[in-house]
Image: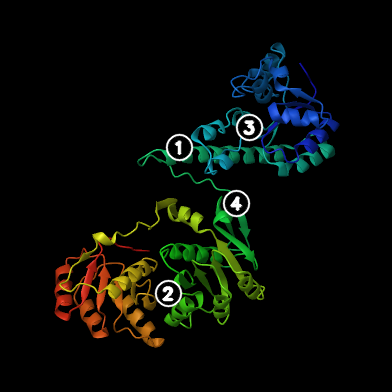
Amino acid sequence: MNTKKRALISVSDKSGIVEFAKSLTELGFEIISTGGTHRLLKESGVDVIKVTDVTGFPEIMDGRVKTLNPFVHGGILANRSIDSHMKEAEELKISMIDMVVVNLYPFEQTVTNPDASHELIIENIDIGGPTMLRSAAKNHNDVAVITDPVDYEKVIDEIKETGSTTLDTREYLAFKTFRHTADYDSLISNYFSGRLEGDIRGYLQVSTPLNKELRYGENPHQSAGYYSRNAEQIVEVFHGKALSYNNFIDIDAALKLIGKFDDKLCLAILKHTNPCGIATGETIEEAHAKALATDTLSPFGGIVITNKEMTLAGAEAINKVFTEIIIAPSYSEEAETKLKKKKNRRLLTYSPERLKRLLNSKYTVSCLDGYLSQDLDYAKDDVNNWKVATDRQPTAEEMEALKFGWSTVATLKSNAVCFTKADRTIGLGIGQTSRIDSTEIAISKAKKFGLEIKGSICASDGFFPFRDSIDAMHELGITAIIQPGGSKGDQECIEACNEYGITMIMTGMRHFRH
């Protein structure tokens, strides 16, 4: 039985592996390797043994079976402190393997490639790799296991200093390994879940790497981190200081808001995840002026998001109000130059195509000692299913305003009521314990900023239970109302609308946001 220290190396991510293997050989290790890793090491001048020379068995079935062998796993799993293990290994001529250096087939890169076939994805499910990793991690008392190239230098330095890796280091590496294999299996499970029809999840798979460590959370005494696989693909910060926890929350709200308005140029101003104003227009500056008019006080230090390229004229309009974050799909060169003059302002781009992926995903939050998960509220309301419950039909202009208002109210926190025209918000009532309070706030906001409510429409995320709300709408000069319907008081509200000549649409779909 070979008593020389041995390391088995088989990696798909080959960054730094040649230098690491050379350092190991200088420290007296014998290197065993497979396939492409063996070729690379040999071509780089590393003295390396083929795994087939260790197992006495060829790689078969296009490489699907090569390390699943007692001469490999016996050498990894033998407990050096148990005499019977070592006696068996000696009798079977199984030499010990003291280090396993493996990272897995690139399943994640393959499964996120839109051109990858199902067959290619299946072939990138690693079997031998996770088995070796789990074996080595289980036996970390005797075996060092490395999955991350970032650990190569630490391991070499420790061996040089002490002659071996410490148990603390091996336990830490084992922890990283089990975390890695759990994440890998989670990706595979989620892939199959996405292919199969029906609710077959059974488990909520939450296994996501740390994308960015944040300075702190909502408040300085709270630690925080951002965990994501896809954030850099959906949004990119290309100017300004690092994002905070609260910035991430606000950006998420802004993206989910703009996703409701994808048919024409739209701009929204947000503060603390709530819209201050939303508007459409022919140009960025026109939409910004309309959105800002809804509330000229709150936008200071807020966020602006638009679904069209940021122009110089748009940038100049936005620049008149201190805006902490600006988000657009792209920026003209002149707009970018203008906006970058403020060093601490964050400028972000986002991918509209990848935003669609976000909007079709699940929304998950921690709750009690578990999680709540649901589909995001992006079911497209079918206008053909809307019911005009009153005698009076909406005019064409009112219908456009009702559509805009219904999209707007779906972005507000409940209870929510808003007054809008076809192209802008007039008054927003957000997050109150009663619909009456939300209505009163929407009214007071419109009046505070000198906006005319008369002739606008009213949208409510929930039903109106009594006609007193309709009476109030009539006094304000509201011409049309859109709401889900479904209250015992629906008929009373319909009769009140008919009495006043107000149009009321019932959508049959509510948009509560707690």
Q: Amino acid at mark 3?
A: Leu
> Is disc 2 surrounded by few (<14), some (14 to 19) or many (20+) residues within 10 Å?
many
Residue 210 — which label? 4
Q: Which residue is mark 3?
A: 133
> Is disc 4 surrounded by few (<14), some (14 to 19) or many (20+) residues within 10 Å?
few
Residue 192 — which label? 1
- Cα distance in 3D space between marks 2 and 4: 36 Å
**Image point (62%, 30%), residue name:** 129
Across and down, in percent, residue 165 comes to 76, 36
In the picture shown, does residue 9 fall above or below 398? Answer: above
At mark 4, the secondary structure is strand
Can residue 309 be spotted in the picture?
A: yes
The answer to which of marks 3 and 1 sits earlier in the sequence is 3
Residue 12 — which label? none
Q: Amino acid at mark 2?
A: Ala
Residue 279 — which label? 2
189 or 331, nearer to the observer = 331
Across and down, in percent, residue 326 comes to 56, 70
The answer to which of marks 1 and 4 sits earlier in the sequence is 1
Is 401 left or right of 218, judged from the image as shown? left
Q: Amino acid at mark 1?
A: Phe
Tag 1–tag 4 contact (CB < 8 Å): no
Q: Quadrant of the C terminus?
A: bottom left
- Cα distance in 3D space between marks 2 and 1: 41 Å
Looking at this rendering, what residue extends furthest in the top direction? 91
Across and down, in percent, residue 192 comes to 45, 37
